[in-house]
Amino acid sequence: MLKRFISYYKPHKKMLALDMLAALLISLIGMVYPIVTNKMLNEYIPKRMYTTIVIAGVIVLVLYALRMFMRYFVQYYGHLIGVKMQSQMRKDLFDHLQKLPFSFYDNNETGRIMTRITSDLFEVCELAHHGPENLLISSVMIVFSFTYLMTIDPILTLIIFACVPILVVVTMHYRKAMKRAFDDRRKSNATINAAVESSVTGIRVTKAYTNADREVEKFVKGDEQFVDASRRAYSAMAKFHASTSFVTDVFNVFILIAGGLFLYADRISFGDYSTFIVSVNLFISPVNTLIGFMEQFQNGVSGFRRFVEIMEETPETDAPDAIALENVKGEIEFKNVSYSYDPTKEVLHNIDLKLEKGRKLALVGPSGGGKTTLCHLLPNFYKLDNGEGSISIDGKDIRSLTLESVRKNIGIVQQDVFLFVGTIRDNILYGRPDATDEEIHEAARRANIHDYIMTLENGYDTEIGERGVKLSGGQKQRLSIARVFLKDPAILILDEATSALDNTTEVLIQQALDELCKGRTTLVVAHRLSTIRNADEIAVVMDGRITERGTHEELMAQNGTYKSLYALQFRDNDIFE
């Protein structure tokens, strides 16, 4: 993990070197004051060297002015290095997230992922900036002050520095407790973010069901966990700071007693004694800096560890000898396909399906039967393992094809339409980012949405809000269809594309879908059986198996599950109509 962290410094080696040089100069200038103090008290003042006193004072003042600029450089450019490292980590993390499989997002909440990208990486940024500087400045100050004090009186120096091992022991003792506590606090913070993200996204459902109190209750529960984790974290931190502060206070006591006795015994002069007091304070300051740095270190390491956890998640990858899918005809075949999301429950069992170029296959049956899983397996959103059968396009096993080439040739229209924040144009362009305005307009016309767009004040540049909140369900669906028209894939998946729409809107959507299906191999999942009566073949999927298959007329003649579902659905329509 350390090697990975250091690798992010590489693009900033020159700036980091200058930053460290400035930090070193700050440390060296800090040692000038006790040296000048010693000379003043032991030599310049007793010998009445007034000119030298003034010159020494001016030199110290000039050095302090230089240190001011060095501190500005360290603060500004040091933070800039940290921010750039944070930016690179964020880019790497976001890029990696794009490559992770569906299964990762099945098991990780959006709010928790957001925490890793934002607050976790901020802590890493602070560590990246302050870590090297604090370590360098503090280490140099401690070593130099120790060396200088040894030249004045080795015995008194060793007596005072005998407290250092005690400080190390105390630090190591509380470090583990702080690490565990701050890890728990970070996890609790992620829980709160996840709860907020979920609640804000579903605010309309919350209001519709008047469940605001329930959402507040869930938030408060997560917040209480955060408070409890923070209490334990700050308790560990308080014990750490209280104990280490006590040890540093002991330094001052040792100076008073040991230094006073040495002065009384004429072992050291008053000037040396004064120098000891000044120098030891210069020693105590970096020690306290290192102590405070431990908290920042724990936060930064915890954040980076959580960053690494995601970066080590296995991304989607092509097979070593994968080839691109080109000149797609659209022939699809499922051979003996079995699949399970976890070993305890098989979702699909020995599925065999074949779909010729330009044909439409409809999948019907009860919810949870495995229809959507079949649709997710075709674009390789979930990978089949060896022994789970095979899926091929134009006779080529999709596992032997590059993921990008397979997905570029498959268009998907789902019931739950996802639109991005931005304009209508942006969302249609998602189908093919290099499309011209004319191609965008043509795609919208074929999706029966162009005329509506032109009635808007800003037309295609109209902002649609988060997830298209400013549009109706039918308008969102037609935008998603326009997006697929622009993509122009050879294979089409319609996953309950009209099930959430009213009858009038469904007619418009169905017209657009019929136009979209022309010349494309289409896999349809439908609950409204009236929409798939003209499919070339219909397969009934129940409990992960295909129990019936044939045309609408053939399945009706079998008097099986399909006919029962069809009769039940139209009976319900009669009741409501």
Image: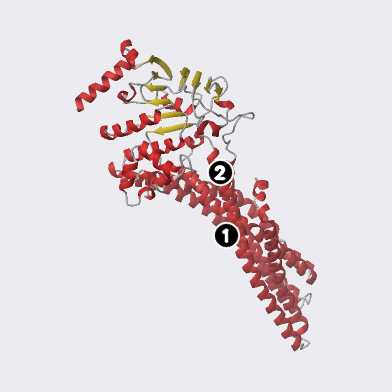
Q: What amino acid type should be assigned to the residue bearing mark 1? A: Ala
Which quadrant holds residue 498?
Answer: top left
Query: What is the x, y in percent for residue 44?
Result: 76, 84
Whole-angstrom CA distance, mark 2 to mark 1, is: 43 Å
Query: What is the x, y in percent for residue 363?
Result: 39, 22
Relative to 375, 175 lies left or right: right
Which quadrant holds residue 293?
Answer: bottom right
Up the image or down, 440 lies above or below 169; here it is above
Identify the residue position indicated by label 2 in the image: 95
Residue closest to the eye, 316 or 234: 316
Residue closest to the eye, 351 or 420: 420
State whether residue 223 appears in this view. yes
Up the image or down, 56 lies above or below 90; here it is below
Q: Tell me what residue is drawn at x 66 percent, y 76 percent.
A: 65
**Residue, far top:** 558
Q: Which colour scheme is used?
A: secondary structure
Residue closest to the eye, 309 or 358: 358
Q: Counting other residues with Cα less than 10 Å from the Cα at mark 2, is it few (<14), some (14-19), or many (20 or more)?
A: few
Up the image or down, 432 lies above or below 42; here it is above
Q: What amino acid type should be assigned to the residue bearing mark 2? A: Asp
Number of numbered discs: 2
Identify the residue position indicated by label 1 in the image: 242
Query: What is the x, y in percent for residue 524?
Result: 39, 26
Relative to 57, 517 lies left or right: left
Query: What is the x, y in percent for residue 199?
Result: 37, 45
